[in-house]
């Protein structure tokens, strides 16, 4: 595990994270078992999925649901559950 | 006492204080930014005394009277991470209750200084001295220094601040002394001038403060398979650094205050053939017995390790290398059936040595059971037998227990 990561001499002591905003570097998408897939033909762009997504992984462009950010989506399925027209399916990775 | 020694003592500014009060005085002079503590026998006098100093406006310390020791150490962790010089104090079951956070403090590399007044862990419940509390915490990642008397406890508390905060170390320190035996016994304590102590300890400036909103940092994030191991490796390195750095800090302390502290302290060891190794107040009793037996012509000595963490292996090996037989006295039991922790670690160190004495273990003083000069004499007599016969009759003995 983590063969390419920095060694113990190169990292801050005590588990300190010495700056802010580092969550961006940690791609939690690898945790996912099921991924959300949207059927754009049914989507009404109500953006309920964008509101409810706990990981800000629903990307909206020009006021419309554009895509999922699979780098950070953990596959919780809240978007699929909340979608009023059931256009989001959870598919096994 | 010789006349010159008496005169020398008279010139000192001695104050009659208990070991606990001596710690309180050290804390007054250190004047930490934050103290979060919960009273527990026999440490109570420290918290009581320091609270009074805060109430009387004698120190500017922020005192957090918490609801438990778990909260005490938790508050200390937050405070220390924010960059505040932080202290607490505890004993026995109090230390046991803060267990989880004791490890966290060391792991987050927070230089908290904690006087611990050694007391037997329950159960059955007991309030008197043994070392089961801090010996249980020997692998928690804290530095541990053991004090023979109130004077040493006072001085160790001051020097502990410098050790904990040294950039090569950054580890918390337990300053141990024997419950009741020294914590409640009144001694003439030679207190250093306030300004000299303040000058010696200097100011604590943390590189990354939890409260520095301009440069936000995260303390204590989830640390899984990918980095936890590296952080543990760093802690080992810090302990290794401490072994090299503590003598430098002690040198400076000795020069400043006219002392002669070291990682270990030998007494009449140079030409000794047998010796006892023991921590804290029992070293004082043993020293008296050494003098008595020396008058009888027995070549006996004493080794008192002052630091147990980091373990001063090289110094102990060297100190014991010329002996024929050594008895290691443990004021705690490990229940491994292999004897006490001090015995095990010294024996383990001696395995690497070409010149090693025969070594036996005596567990003594559990739950505050008194140890008398006669008990210690018995140990030296047994060592004489081992020296002559080169045979160990009993590897682990229980000194002072009723059969």
Image: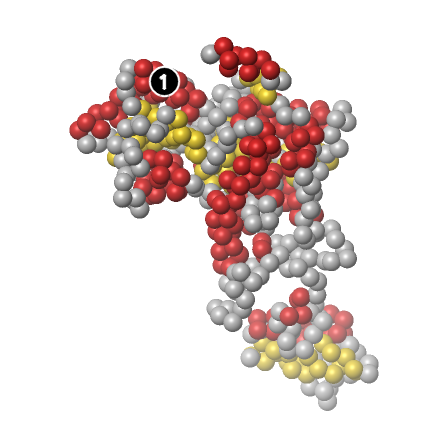
Residue B335 visible (yes or no): no
Residue occupying the point 56% across, 45% down: B171
Residue occupying the point 67% across, 26% down: B193
* Horizontal side, residue B305 vs residue B51: left or right: left
Q: Residue furthest right?
A: A63
Secondary structure of residue under mark 1: helix
Residue B359 sits above or below residue B243 on the image: above
Which of the pair B167/B370 is nearer the observer?
A: B167
* Horizontal side, residue B372 vs residue B97: left or right: left
Which of the pair B383/B294 is nearer the observer?
A: B294
Q: Position of residue A10 (x, y in %)?
A: 56, 63
Q: Position of residue B123 (x, y in %)?
A: 45, 30
Q: Residue furthest top?
A: B3
Q: Position of residue B199 (x, y in %)?
A: 68, 35
Q: Residue furthest left?
A: B389
Q: Residue furthest front?
A: B4
How crowded pointer 1 is (Cα within 10 Å; few <14, some 14-19, many 20+) is rated as some
The residue marked by circle 1 belongs to what chain? Answer: B
Q: Position of residue A28 (x, y in %)?
A: 61, 70
* Horizontal side, residue B215 vs residue B400: left or right: right
Q: Based on the displayed image, in which of its 4 quarters is residue B268 positioned?
A: top left
Residue B15 visible (yes or no): yes
Q: Which corner quadrant holds the C terminus of chain B? A: top left
Which of the pair B214/B399 is nearer the observer?
A: B214
All told, the count of numbered labels is 1
Q: Based on the displayed image, in which of its 4 quarters is residue B265 positioned?
A: top left
Residue B27 sits above or below residue A84 on the image: above
Residue occupying the point 22% across, 28% down: B387
Q: Which residue is mark 1?
A: B291
Q: How is the image coloured?
A: secondary structure
């Amino acid at each position: 595990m983590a063969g390419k990561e920095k060694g113990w001499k190169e990292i801050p002591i005590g588990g300190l994270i010495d700056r802010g905003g580092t969550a961006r570097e940690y791609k939690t998408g690898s945790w996912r078992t099921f991924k959300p897939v949207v059927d754009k033909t049914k989507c009404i762009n109500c953006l309920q999925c964008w509101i409810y997504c706990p990981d800000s992984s629903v990307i909206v462009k020009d006021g419309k649901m554009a895509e999922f950010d699979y780098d950070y989506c953990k596959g919780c399925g809240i978007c699929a559950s909340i979608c009023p027209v059931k256009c989001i399916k959870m598919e096994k990775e | 006492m010789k006349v010159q020694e008496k005169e020398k003592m008279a010139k000192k500014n001695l104050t009659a204080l208990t070991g606990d009060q001596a710690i309180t005085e050290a804390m007054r002079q250190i004047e930490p930014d934050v103290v979060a503590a919960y009273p527990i026998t026999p440490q109570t006098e420290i918290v009581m005394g320091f609270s009074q100093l805060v109430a009387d406006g004698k120190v500017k310390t922020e005192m957090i009277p918490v609801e438990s020791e778990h909260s005490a150490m938790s508050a200390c962790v937050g405070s220390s991470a924010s960059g505040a010089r932080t202290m607490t104090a505890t004993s026995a079951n109090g230390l046991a209750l803060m267990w989880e956070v004791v490890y966290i403090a060391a792991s987050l590399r927070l230089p908290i200084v904690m006087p611990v007044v050694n007391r037997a862990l329950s159960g059955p419940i007991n309030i008197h001295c043994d070392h089961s509390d801090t010996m249980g915490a020997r692998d928690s990642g804290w530095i541990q220094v053991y004090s023979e008397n109130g004077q040493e406890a006072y001085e160790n508390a001051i020097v502990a601040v410098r050790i904990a905060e040294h950039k090569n170390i950054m580890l918390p320190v337990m300053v141990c002394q024997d419950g009741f035996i020294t914590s409640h016994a009144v001694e003439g304590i030679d207190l250093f001038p306030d300004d000299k102590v303040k000058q010696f300890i200097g100011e604590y400036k943390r590189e990354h403060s939890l409260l520095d909103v301009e440069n936000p940092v995260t303390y204590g994030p989830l640390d899984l398979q990918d980095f936890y191991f590296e952080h543990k490796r760093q802690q080992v390195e810090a302990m290794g650094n401490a072994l090299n750095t503590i003598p430098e800090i002690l040198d400076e302390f000795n020069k400043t205050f006219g002392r002669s502290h070291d990682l270990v302290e030998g007494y009449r060891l140079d030409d000794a053939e047998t010796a006892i190794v023991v921590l804290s107040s029992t070293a004082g009793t043993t020293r008296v017995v050494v003098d008595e037996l020396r008058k009888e012509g027995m070549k006996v000595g004493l080794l008192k390790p002052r630091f147990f963490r980091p373990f001063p292996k090289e110094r102990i090996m060297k100190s014991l290398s010329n002996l024929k037989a050594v008895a290691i006295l443990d004021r705690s039991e490990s229940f491994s059936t292999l004897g006490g922790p001090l015995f095990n670690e010294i024996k383990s160190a001696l395995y690497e040595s070409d010149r090693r004495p025969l070594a036996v273990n005596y567990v003594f003083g559990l739950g505050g059971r008194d140890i008398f000069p006669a008990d210690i004499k018995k140990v030296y007599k047994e060592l004489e037998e081992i020296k002559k016969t080169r045979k160990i009759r009993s590897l682990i003995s229980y000194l002072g227990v009723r059969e």
